[in-house]
Amino acid sequence: MTTRPLSRRELNRATLARQFLLSRTDRSVPDVIEHLVGLQAQTPHTWYTGLWTRIAGFSPEVAADGLVERTLVRMAVMRSTIHLVTARDAGALRALVQPVLDRDLFTNHTHKAAVRDLDLDAVTTAGRELLAERPRTQRELGALLHQRWPDRPPAGLAYAVRNLVPLVQVPPRGLWGRSGSIAHTTAEAWLGGLPDGGPPDGGLLDRGLPGGGLDLAGLVRRYLGAFGPATVRDLQTWSGLTRLSEVVDSIRGELLVLRDEDDRELFDLPQAPRPDADTPAPPRYLYDFDNLLLSHADRSRVITGDFQRYSFRPHGPVPSVVLIDGVTGGDWTIERTGAAATLHVRTYRRLSTELTTKVVTEGAGLLAFAAADADRHDVQVRVVPD
């Protein structure tokens, strides 16, 4: 136990270090995805930027190849949202957060009435069989299930299968530079159908960890390794699970117990990095659903009041975040006009000439990555409010 509380800036630097946002890492794409416990990926392509901003020399084709080769999958896990995870993690993560998807199914405003008093075992069995035949869209799956349960709306039947059966979105959806319909099959059919009988290092339900698969205590450790130091509420916000204080208490003796400026109890891995508050944090471009912005109950270690005031755009497009000095210092969008690509950066405060140069340099790298096919690149930085 430390007696000095951690400042908000110290929390910021600790989390940025674990997110590979103080300096890019040379680790492999699967290693980074596992370290981060997946990337939120309900959009088909923006998550590639999340890997680019964290991995030195990142090639999007490497991640796309992982989807094709089935070492990476996009599936609903934490918070019942689509994440990019490794095949090694897929089964264990889904099994641990299944209560979140159960709760969502029975409380969802749109679909809860459709599943009331329904034989869910029969629905999921039918859904598995249909999706094992070939990948299908939710609309197609719902229509087929509706033939057997004509008194239930097709969308509700498909949603029940989506929440109760581990499904993966199959390529070409999510491939870099390509697109496709949102089609699903079962994780069992997709991952169990590999030529060698399953993914490497443990298979669908086993990550190859000592002692077997991942349990809730292991999930806590991995969260702290990627997002800590953190409170129990932070952990529950990230995962969607409840009553995790009992899990944390069961491993309290192996964790470092800290306090924040508001005297809240924080937990951390003893060997995890906790850089000094004055550690430099270079500008970094995040994507729209970056988990750094979504995985704490108290998001003030990264999200500023300026972001809350200025980031909303009533007429789109939805902007993504620019981290400046480690916090939400601005937002960005890319505009394509003919053969030209322009990165529009809005900062919430006026920057020094030196810092503006760093924002532009990093932005030029983003354009070279995200708009490699454009003949002309331009980075424009302005301050809001003007």
Image (spheres, rainbow, N blue to C red):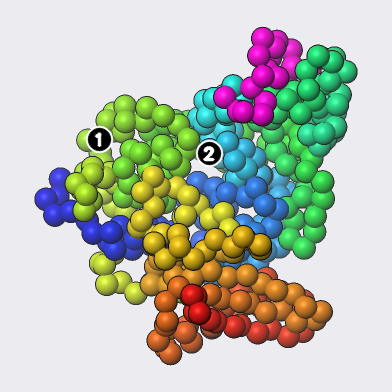
SS for callout 2: helix
Residue 109: say if magenta.
Answer: yes
SS for callout 1: helix
Query: Which amino acid, by three-letter code, is at mark 1?
Result: Arg
Mark found first going from the N terminus, 2 or 1: 2
Identify the disc placed on residue 252: 1
Q: Nearer the viewer, mark 2 or mark 1?
A: 2
269 horizontally vs 219: left or right: left
Image quadrant where residue 160 sits? top right
User: Callout 2 environment at 10 Å: few (<14), some (14 to 19), or many (20+)?
Assistant: many
Camera-side residue of 211 and 162: 162
- Which residues make up the magenta segment? 107-127
Q: In the image, what residue occupies the spot 70% across and 10% down?
A: 119
Instruction: Inspect this view and state whether residue 338 appears.
Output: yes
- For disc 2, the marked residue is 78
Q: Position of residue 371 (x, y in %)?
A: 71, 74
Q: In the image, what residue occupies the spot 29% across and 63% down?
A: 9
Identify the disc placed on residue 195: none
- From the viewer's perspective, is residue 16 above or below residue 205? below
Separation (CA) of disc 2 from disc 1 = 23 Å
